[in-house]
Amino acid sequence: MPVEIYRRGLLLVLSSPSGAGKSTLARRLLGADPDITMSVSVTTRAIRPGEIDGKDYYFIDQARFDKMRKQGELLESATVFGNGYGTPRKPVDDWLAAGKDVLFDIDWQGTQQIVDKLPNDLVRVFILPPSAEELRERLIRRAQDPMKVVAGRMAEASREISHYAEYDYVLINDDLERCLDELCTILTAERLKRHRRAGLSDFVNRLQDKL
Ligand code: 5GP
């Protein structure tokens, strides 16, 4: 019979410049692992074609965003490309307590705020594109943004990348399958860390009693 040890959930943050393949990686990880769930952010930016309200983001107006911030309903928040983004706090607290892991697709500003609030629960992974050319091509291929926005996102990419050293792990997404494999390896090892396995001391005590 497998030995089940209770553990506290962890917060897995994925950051990268837009277009580094982070969303695809996140989707694949969620599909492959039932113990991790995605945190759905709120944003004030306009909905893009193909996006679903409540799944990709909760699309809200500035007044609602400001109110959520003021009332402490956001675990973290930041302004990215002139739009407000934030993580609703309540679902994260519930999932952690239930021993579930939560995946975040947030930028470096939000990551730093979570470090301050939940340092022991956080695992930070930064995804780099293999090259600047590849990043530009991915942004253009995605074709969801006008060219002016693409140019702005390239400039923003450089600023985002300058924060890579604030992360625990840095992966280069030159091969999606390998990168996903590396991400799963990180998750497995982090789940096994002693400080997260809250049920370990009970298990060891029971073991000692029988020795
Ligand atoms: P996009 O508008 O392309 O979906 O996301 C733009 C950027 O905002 C990405 O770098 C993404 O990681 C970041 N982002 C999305 N949601 C949040 C959030 O809740 N908080 C923070 N700090 N950044 C976010």
Image (spheres, grey):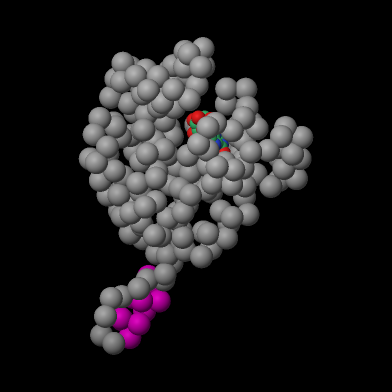
The residue at the point 57 percent across, 26 percent down is 80
Residue furthest front as drawn: 49
Q: Quadrant of the N terminus?
A: bottom left
Q: Quadrant of the C terminus?
A: bottom left
Examine the structure image and report whether residue 89 is included in the region drawn in magenta.
Answer: no
Magenta stretch, residue numbers? 200-209
The residue at the point 39 percent across, 36 percent down is 22
Residue 32: x and y, percent? 33, 54
The residue at the point 35 percent across, 56 percent down is 33
Give the side of residue 122 with respect to residue 136, left or right. Answer: right
- The relative height of residue 200 versus residue 24 in the rendered view (above or below) is below
Residue 193: x and y, percent? 35, 57
Q: Main secondary structure of the magenta part?
A: helix
Q: Quadrant of residue 138?
A: top left
The residue at the point 32 percent across, 26 percent down is 129
Give the side of residue 8 with respect to residue 76, left or right. Answer: left
Residue 93: x and y, percent? 58, 57
Give the number of callouts: 0
Is residue 210 among what the camera can see?
yes
Is residue 120 among what the camera can see?
no
- The relative height of residue 39 versus residue 65 in the rendered view (above or below) is below
The foreground one among 13 and 179 is 179
Residue 40: x and y, percent? 55, 46
- The relative height of residue 81 versus residue 172 in the rendered view (above or below) is above
The foreground one among 65 and 207 is 65
Q: Quadrant of residue 82?
A: top right
